[in-house]
Amino acid sequence: MTLMEQIQKRLSKLSPEKQREVLDFVDFLRLRPYQLPEPTTEAKRSGKIKELLNQLGAMKTFSEIADPVTWQRNIRKDRSLPGRAS
């Protein structure tokens, strides 16, 4: 039995309402641009992270932080959360 025959056989067992849903889904599949994502290797991922970190450095993103250790301690300090008893 071909794939088309299998689809037709199963489709014929559905209610008309469900058949309309199948038709809508087929139209959706036909119209959407479909492209498989490119597999990401660890090397590509690492390269992309390095590139992004270099961009951050070039933009001097964190240049206003004089002492990173102090900044990190301050940012991690416990603080009260809105709507919660402290």
Image (cartoon, helix red, strand yellow):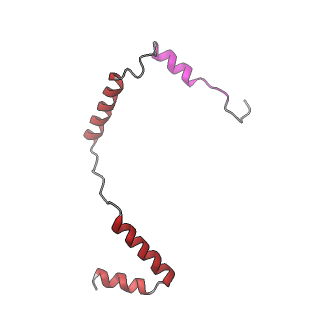
Q: Is residue 2 above or below residue 67?
A: below
Is most of the magenta stretch helix, strand or loop?
helix
75 magenta-colored: yes
* Image location of residue 84, percent across then percent down: 71, 35
Q: Residue at x 27, y 83 (%)?
A: 2
Which of the two residues, 42 or 5, is positioned nearer the viewer here? 5
Residue at the farthest right position:
85
* Most distant residue in the top direction: 66
Rendered image quadrant of residue 32: bottom left
Quadrant assignment for the C terminus: top right
Q: Is residue 25 left or right of residue 34?
A: right
Residue at image position (50%, 21%) is 72
Coordinates of residue 51 in the picture (x, y in percent)? 29, 31
At 64% from the left edge and 26% from the top edge, which residue is drawn? 79
**Where does the magenta region start and end?**
67-80
> Which residue is at 30% across, 31% downward?
50
The quadrant in which residue 78 appears is: top right
Q: Where does the image place residue 37, in percent across and percent down from the top left?
A: 30, 53
Q: How many marks?
A: 0
Is 33 part of what is drawn in magenta?
Answer: no
Q: Is residue 59 above or below residue 81?
A: above
The N terminus: image quadrant: bottom left
Residue placed most toward the observer, 65 or 84: 65
Residue 53 location (% of width, % of height): 34, 28
